[in-house]
Image (cartoon, grey):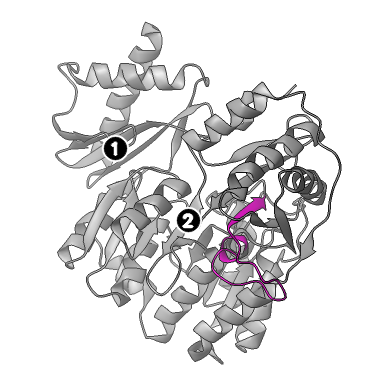
Amino acid sequence: MIKKTIFREYDIRGIFEKELNEQSVKLIGYFLGKKMKLLGGVVAIGYDARTHSPILRDYLASGLNFAGCKVLDMGMVATPVNYFSNYVNPINVEEQVNASIMITGSHNPSEYNGFKITLDKAPFFGEEIYVLGDEILANAEMEIPNNIEVTKIDTKQQYIDYIVESFSHLKGFDKKIVLDGGNGVADTVITDIFDALELNYEGIYMEPDGTFPNHHPDPSIEENLVDVKALLEKSGDIAFAYDGDADRIAVLTHKYNIKGDQMALLYSMKMENPTVIGEVKCSQVMYDELERRGATAIMYKTGHSNLKVKMRETNADLACEVSGHIFFKHRYFGYDDAIYATFRMLELLQDGINLDSELAKLPQVFSTEEIKVETSEAEKFLLMDKVKELLENPPVDFPAIKDIIDVDGVRINFEDGWGLVRASNTTPVLVTRFESTDKEKAKLYESAINGLILEAKNSL
């Protein structure tokens, strides 16, 4: 039986064998392949360090081959290397890549896996994935023969050469750099690049291991940064940590764990009047500071696919998510790449920018991390509708509302801060976040909005 729940907003994701098995993955390959064939049918596949990723590669290749595609296999790579394959001509292959599929469970537990899909340099997501799911469910009994014929390509080396050339001016930069690969796939490329640039670094947990024996591969969670912080304190000037497929980054100094919206402010310092896109969870400080500098700041939906599409639409220079997805169109291709973001941060240091000093200049605000309210897939959007309804006539003791931004959930702007409620597109939760220039008011906003959520729950 194929479960509809594996077809998510941004990707296809599920538990190996239980949900992503031979039948479901062959069908995914076949019906995706039919769409890719219309573009030319040259598909590049890469996979992460999970033990079952090569097995899924074979299932996927069988479906793609049955659809008449030419399947290019780049082996174990970082997700940004997979994206990169859409922009370069593969060595020893005449055809241009028309689409790519990255087999990865990202930062999820080791039993999970999934597919991040690119067609014609654009993310395949949202309604497209849901329609694909319906098509597969309607043909769930279709049999697809084994055919794991692939053409091997070395996109990894092309990527390494590209980054080394792009950042050749960093050669011999003498800051002591600490890396935490999280046993993901960052080190399929990153230490080769560091070595070629003769950089001074020390890495921990760099060996790809899909069982993730040292810590969960999610650098947005503080407890996963304990070891890299200790090494930074002992012998480093700056530290970088990566998620399981190396499309998200954490940047650490001796003083700060620099969040994605703060990174955007730092990166944009070296861009002339940039257009910068942030998600709804980004600090108001980022939007205000960008506009103060003469930049164009755009608030948009959460999700790496959403931001990539919005970047193409607006020709933005940079985009960010608080969690560490950083997207550069300025001097790059407009997708999220934690490896590339590493070297753009090192450039700032080489240019004499003191990261701690720049962050210390920003207005002080009190922000919560993402707070997740457990619900169910069936109820989360109903809850959001009810919260919106309650905001039309809030309780008399509710803080005064300046305005509401509804681009993704509701971001409620108050006199001294804001609160956010949105339904997660990937898990059965509501996501909330709160910020204020006053710590007590941040707590007040949190309490008031939690009261609305509770009222909404009780009314369902």
Describe the element under mark 2 as helix, strand or loop: loop
User: 375 left or right of 43?
Assistant: left
Give the residue pinned by disc 2: 325
Q: Nearer the viewer, mark 1 or mark 2?
A: 1
Q: Nearer the viewer, residue 137 or 174?
A: 137
Q: Main secondary structure of the magenta part?
A: loop
Indicate the quadrant containing the C terminus: top left, top right, bottom left or bottom right.
top left
Residue 93 lies in the magenta stretch: yes
Residue found 25% across the figure and 50% down from its top: 284
Q: Place residue 447 in its image quadrant.
A: top left
Three-letter residue code for mark 1 = Val
Describe the element under mark 1 as helix, strand or loop: loop
Q: How crowded is mark 2: few (under 14 residues within 10 Å), some or many (20 or more)?
A: many
Three-letter residue code for mark 2 = His
Residue found 33% across the figure and 52% down from its top: 278
Looking at the picture, how far across and down is residue 50, in whole percent?
Answer: 76, 50
Q: Residue 407 carries which label?
A: 1
Q: Place residue 261 in its image quadrant.
A: bottom left
Q: Distance between the residues labelled 1 and 2?
A: 19 Å
Residue 86 lies in the magenta stretch: yes
Q: Nearer the viewer, residue 373 or 125?
A: 125
Q: What stretch is highlighted in magenta?
A: 82-103
